């Protein structure tokens, strides 16, 4: 009964909120990041690009090209669809805990803004079996791809080759389709690196003004330590620390901690031998 109530409550909430988006009912009609993705429909991906600027698209041309079939939709329809994708991602990660997780403010704020952090959480969990999912991080915010050090530290060369190979293949095809867009994006990355990846005062919501390079060093240490001690649940924390801008919505990536922690707990339980029954005295 409890599980059914949690499931049905989550589904009802998701349907209602997606409906508010679909019918452009204020104040829920706007979705800052989803709008940025939708603006790529013009074909000029970086016309208003500036790190931290509201409504600016800052990811790779490959991501914009992947969204091409969706951004032809009207804005309200695209925003509703993107919101539904985020709700589905959260349910895939947490199941019956999806509804209570909305009390953790970064998660509902993430769904409202429409960023990719919940998709990152899915990619991290799925990435242990399907390493190609790491292409999402490398082709969007880039620096969270430091999580690939997990495979390097564990000498899982096949998984590392798949992740990098799939990413390289996508980049090659995308580059052939629009070389100019890639040149623009590389210029944006160089400019952002020169500015320490801090964004600007236009970045919505709370963010922590800590330089990127020290955070990358800390994230790398966490990934390697997690890999050597087989603590998968630490990987989402490293990804959060490695985000170009460390802001509140980015903490939604930590939703991946729950399924990874539970999987580890189940694995430990299975390794514990059952107690041996003592023979009764004759």
Image (cartoon, rainbow, N blue to C red):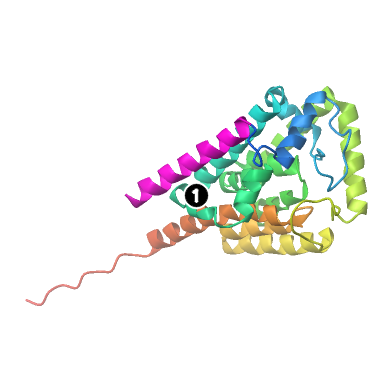
**Side of 1 where 43 appears, left or right:** right
Task: Indicate the position of residue 3 as horizontal and vertical percent values.
Answer: 37, 49
Relative to 163, does residue 212 appear above or below in the rendering?
Answer: below
Q: Is residue 161 among the parts visible in the rendering? A: no
Dividing the image into 4 quarters, which one contains the C terminus?
A: bottom left
Q: Which of the 4 quarters of the picture holds residue 66?
A: top right
In this rendered view, identify the residue nearer to me: 170 or 55. Answer: 55
Asked whether 259 falls inside the magenta stretch, the response is no
Q: Secondary structure at mark 1?
A: helix
Q: Residue at x 42, y 57 (%)?
A: 266
Q: How busy is the neighbourhood of tag 1: few (under 14 within 10 Å), some, or many (20 plus)?
A: many
**Furthest-bottom residue in this view:** 281
Q: Which of the 4 quarters of the picture holds residue 153?
A: bottom right
Q: Is residue 105 among the parts visible in the rendering? A: yes
The magenta stretch is 1-23
Q: Residue at x 85, y 25 (%)?
A: 178
In this rendered view, identify the residue nearer to me: 190 or 91. Answer: 91
Residue where numbered disc 1 is placed:
98
Task: Indicate the position of residue 64 as horizontal and vertical percent values.
Answer: 76, 31
Q: Residue at x 72, y 60 (%)?
A: 219
Task: Indicate the position of residue 214 as horizontal and vertical percent values.
Answer: 81, 64
Asked whether 9 falls inside the magenta stretch, the response is yes
Q: Which of the 4 quarters of the picture holds residue 28?
A: top right
**Side of 171 where 16 appears, left or right:** left
In this rendered view, identify the residue nearer to me: 280 or 83. Answer: 83
Task: Indicate the position of residue 80 as horizontal and vertical percent values.
Answer: 62, 33
**Furthest-left residue in this view:** 282
């Amino acid at each position: 009964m409890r599980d059914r109530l949690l499931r049905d409550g989550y589904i009802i909430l998701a349907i209602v909120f997606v409906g508010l988006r679909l019918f452009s009912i204020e104040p829920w009609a706007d979705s800052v990041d989803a709008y940025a993705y939708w603006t790529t429909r013009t074909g000029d991906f970086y016309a208003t690009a500036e790190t931290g600027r509201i409504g600016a698209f800052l990811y790779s041309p490959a991501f914009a090209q992947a969204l091409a079939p969706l951004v032809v939709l009207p804005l309200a329809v695209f925003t509703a669809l993107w919101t539904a994708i985020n709700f589905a991602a959260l349910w895939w990660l947490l199941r019956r805990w999806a509804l209570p997780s909305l009390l953790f403010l970064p998660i509902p704020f993430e769904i409202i803004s429409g960023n990719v952090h919940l998709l990152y959480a899915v990619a991290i969990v799925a990435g242990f079996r399907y390493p190609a999912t790491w292409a999402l991080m490398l082709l969007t915010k880039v620096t969270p791809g430091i999580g690939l050090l997990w495979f390097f530290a564990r000498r899982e060369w096949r998984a590392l080759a798949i992740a990098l190979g799939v990413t390289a293949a996508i980049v090659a095809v995308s580059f052939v389709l629009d070389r100019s867009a890639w040149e623009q994006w590389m210029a944006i990355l160089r400019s952002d690196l020169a500015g320490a990846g801090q964004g600007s005062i236009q970045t919505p919501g709370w963010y922590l003004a800590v330089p990127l390079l020290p955070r990358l060093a800390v994230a790398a240490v966490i990934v390697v330590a997690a890999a050597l001690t087989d603590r998968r649940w630490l990987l989402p924390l490293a990804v959060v620390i490695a985000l170009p801008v460390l802001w509140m919505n980015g903490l939604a990536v930590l939703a991946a901690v729950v399924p990874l922690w539970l999987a580890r707990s189940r694995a430990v339980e299975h390794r514990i031998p059952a107690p041996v029954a003592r023979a009764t005295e004759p």
